Image (tube, helix red, strand yellow):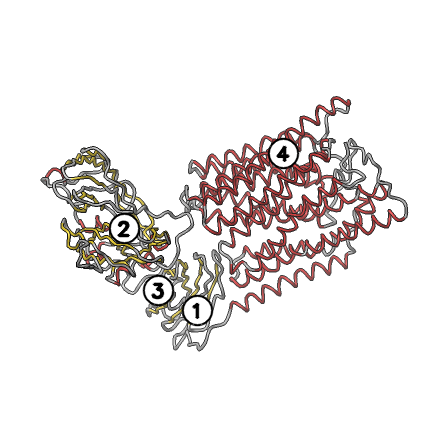
Amino acid sequence: MSPQSASGRPASWHRRAGMPVRLWMVVLILTGLAHWALPDARWLLVHIFTIGLVANSILLWSQTLAERFLGYHLPPQRRPLQLARIYVVNLGLVVTIAGMVGAWWPVTLVGATLIGTMLAWHALALARLIVQAQRHRAATGAGPAENAVSVWFFVASAAMLPFGAAFGVLMAYGFADPEQAGFLVTHQALNILGFLGLAAAGVLLVMFPRLLGETRAPNRRRPVVLGILPAGIAVICAGALTDHPAVAAAGVGVYLVGWLVIVGPFARIVLRHPPDGYAPASICAALLWLIGSLGGYAVMLLTGPFVADRVTVLTVWFLAGFAGQLLFGVMSHLLPTMMGPSAGTVEGANAVTAAGKAEMNRWWLWRLLVINGGLLLWLLPVGSWGKVALSALVMLAYILFLPIMIRSARAAMAVRRDLAAAGTASHPAGGPDPDEPTAVDQAPRSTTPQRPARPQRGLQAVAAAAALALVLAAGTALGGGGDGAVIDAAGSAAPTGRTTTVDVTITGMRFTPDTVTVPRGDRLILNVHNGNHQVHDLVLASGQSTGRIAPGADARLEVDVVGRDIEGWCSIVGHRQRGMVLHIVTDGDEAGGDTAASGHDHGGGPATGATGSVDLMREPGREFRARDPELAPAPGGSVHRVRFEVTEQRGEVAPGVRQTLWTYNGKAMGPTLRGRLGDVFEVTLINHGSMSHSIDFHAGMVSPDTNMRDIAPGEQLVYRFRAEHTGIWLYHCATAPMAVHLAGGMFGAVVIDPPDLPAVDAEYLMVQSEFYLGADGGETDAGKVLAGTPDLVAFNGFANQYVYRPLHAEVDDRIRFWVLDAGPNAPVSFHVIGGQFDTVYSEGAYLLRPDAARGGAQALALQPSQGGFVELTFREPGTYTFLNHRMVDGDRGAMGTIVVAPR
C-alpha cells in the first residue's frame, strides 16, 4: 500500500488534516494581540496552543510517521475516519472554550469528553495499526520494522490526554481547592509531560539523529525510555494527588532521567555536527529548555508551599521554551520533506526538499536568538513593561513561522512544477518502496542547505541582540515616569545610605500592605506583584511609576531618597477611587543598617493585610459554588438525630479573602435543622478543634449547665431538646468570648414550622452574620468584635454570594424568605428592592397577613438572634436586589439578587 496515489488523495487528506493547525495558529496570534481585552486570556492562550496547535499536530504527524515507521500505509478509504477524529477534536476545543469563558461546566464537560474520546480512539487506532503492520510484514517476509517501538510512544502519548482532560474538567467544576496544586500538577504531568513529551520522544529518537547527519538512530534505548518516562509520570501524579510534593519531585527526577537517556547520544552528535538550520537548532534549544524546566520543576516541588500559583509559572517554561520551539522545529523539517517524495525521483525529491528547507531557514539564527534570548531575559527581574515588550518580540519571532511556512510551500511547489515541466516527475502509481527510508525518515546532509556564511550569521546575531536591547529599553522607558504634577520625594532629608525594601501585593482593588513606614533619608525599593486578574500599576506622587503590570506579573519601583510622606495609587480610571491607594510614611528613624519593611497600618493593627484585600466588586472564580439558599421541607418522623463536628479550618468569606473559621461541619454557618411542633432533636456534638467549644440551641428549653457546657478537644456531648414553639431560632457556640466564637462561624438556624404554614412556590433562608477580619488567613479580630466594627456582613456565610450566584423565580411565584439575624452585633432590615411584603412573621407571630385591607410592608426588622419570614409575589420580570437596608451593612456584603423570568 502506498502513502500516495496518482489521484493525490492522501496528499489532499494531509492538507485537509493540517488545516486546523494553520487556523488555530492564526487564532493564537489574534488572541495574543487582544489578550488584554479577553476573559481568562492566559487560559485561552495555553489551551489554544496545546490543543489547537500541539494536539492537532500530534494527531496528524503521529499517524503519518507511524505509517512510515511501520512501513505499512492505510488505504485511502480509511482517511475519512482519521479526518473525523481531527475535526471532532477541534469541535471539542471550541465547545470547551465556550464552556470555560461562559462558566458553563456542563458545556466544558461535553467539550473535554469529545477531545478525550477522540484521543483514546486515536491510541486504539495506532495500536491496531501496529498489529496490522506486524501481520503484513510477517506475511510478506519483510521482518520487523526498525522503528516500530517509536509508534508505541505515540500510543502512550494519545492515551495520556483523556486522563489529563478529565482532571481539567474536575478543576473547572471546582472539585479541587483552586489554591492547591495536586490536580493542577497531575493535569500538567498528563498533558505536557505525557501527551506532548511522549510523542516528542517517539519522533526525536528516530528523526533527530538523522537530522543531524547520523544514519541510524540509537534503537536499543527506545524500550528503556518507553518504560522510564511513563513511570515518572505515574509517580508525579501519585505524589500530587496524595499531597506529597516530594514524591512528585521524585517522579520528575525519574522523568528527567528518561530524557537524559534520550539526549545523551544527541549531545555527542551535536558536537560532531553543529546545527546548521532552524529545525535542528530549534529542537536543540527546546531540549535544553525541557531539561532546565524539569530541574526547576523538581526544585519548586521540593521547596516552598505546594500551591497552584507556584507551579503555574512553569507552564510558560514548558510551553514557550520547550513545546513551541519543538513544534516549529519539527514542522520546519517535516513540511519540506513531505513535499519531496511527490516529485517521483530521488533527485527530484531532494531538489523539492532543498527548496522548501531553504525558505524554512530564512533568518533562522535571528529567530532562534530572539526567542531564547527574549525568554531568558523575561525570567529576569525586569519591569512589567519590559516583560510586555520582550513577550511581543518573542511572539513576533514565533509568528514569522507562518509566512515562512507559506513561502516554503510555494518554493517547493515551484520546483516541483519545474521538474514536471522538464519531464523528470513521473508520479509512479506505486510510490516509494515502503520498506526503504524516505525523506521523512532521514535527512541526507546533501539535501540540507549549507549554513549561512559567517558574515550573514554575524549580521543575524547582531540584529537579534539589537532587537532585544531595543525592546527592553523601550519597555523600561514606558515603565518610567510619573503622572501629573510631582513632588520632591527627598524634601530636605540627607541620604542615609540605607535601603528599605517592601514587598507589595495587589489583591482585589487594594495594595497590601496599604501603608509602609520608611526611615527618613532611606532609599526605598518597592517590589510589586499583581495578584489580581486585572491590569494595574503603581504611580507615586513623586513621579515614579511601575508602568502597567499584567496579572501575575511583577514590577520594581525605586525612590532614591525618601524624606517626606508620599502617596501612591493605581492610575487606571476608577481604580484610585475604589481604594487602590498606597501610603509611604517616614518615621524619622536614624538607626543604622538596611531595613526590610513588611508594612503596617497607622495603628499597627494585624488585620491590614486581610482587610486591605477585601474587594466586594470582585467576582468569585468560576469554580465558586454559593451555599444553597433553598430551605428544604421538614423531614418525616418526629425524632431527628444529627451529628455536629467542630473544626477549625481556613475558608473563604469573600472573593479572595480567607480566614481561619471555627465551624460546625466545616462551614461558616452550620447545618440548618427543620421540624414541627413537638419534634425532638438529638444533636451529637464532637470537638475536633484545638480549644473548648459548645453549642446553644435557642429552639430548646433546657438547662444550660449540662447541654451548653464547654467540651475540650476530643470530647463530645449529646444535646437533646423538644420543639415547644414555632419560629426560626438561632444556635451558636456559647463558649467565652461568645461573640468571637459566633463571629468565627459557629452559628446556624433551626426552623420550626407554624401549624398553619401555607405552601409557596419557593422558600429561601437568609442568615445574616458579621466577619471581623484578622490577618490574612488568621483568626477573628477580637478587638474589632468588641468595638462592633465588622469588615464584612454576609448572608449564609459568604459576602455578596447571591449577587454573583442569584436566586431564580418566575412572575407570580409566591416566595417566602426566612430571615435570621445571627449577629453577634448588627441588626438587619431585610428589604427587596422593587418588591413589597404582604406577609410578615416575626418572633413567632404574624405581624401582617394578606387581607382585604391590602396592607403591606417594606422591611423585616430584626435584632441579633431574632428571626422571622416575609412573603411576596413578583408582578414583573426583572432582577430584584434583596439586602440589609441598613445600608452600611448592605454595602459590606449583606446583599443578593433574585432573577424573575416571565412565566
* Residue 197 appears left or right of 489: right
- Asked whether 453 or 615 is in front, the reply is 615
- Asked whether 376 or 326 is in front, the reply is 326
Toward the right, the furthest residue is 422
Q: Callout 4: 10 Å neighbours few (<14), some, many (20+)?
A: many
Amino acid of disc 4: Phe
> Label 4 vs label 2: CA separation?
60 Å
Mark 1 or 2: in front is 2
Amino acid of disc 3: Thr
* Residue 518 appears left or right of 697: right
Amino acid of disc 2: Ile
Quarter of the figure that contains the N terminus: top right
Q: Name the residue beneath numbered marker 1.
A: 573
Between discs 1 and 2, the one toward the N terminus = 1
- Is residue 746 shown above or below 875? above
Between discs 2 and 3, the one toward the N terminus = 3
Question: Which residue is depicted at the point 86% across and 47% down?
Answer: 419
- The answer to whether the residue labelled 3 contacts the one labelled 4, judged by CB atoms less than 8 Å apart, is no
Q: Quadrant of residue 88?
A: top right
Amino acid of disc 1: Val
Q: Quadrant of residue 828?
A: bottom left
Between discs 4 and 2, the one toward the N terminus = 4
Mark 3 or 1: in front is 1
Picture coordinates of residue 31 (x, y %)? 57, 56
Mark 3 or 4: in front is 4
| Callout 4 secondary element | helix
Q: Name the residue beneath numbered marker 3.
A: 515
- The answer to whether the residue labelled 4 contacts the one labelled 2, judged by CB atoms less than 8 Å apart, is no
Q: Name the residue beneath numbered marker 2.
A: 815
Q: Name the residue beneath numbered marker 4.
A: 153
Picture coordinates of residue 552 (x, y %)? 47, 56
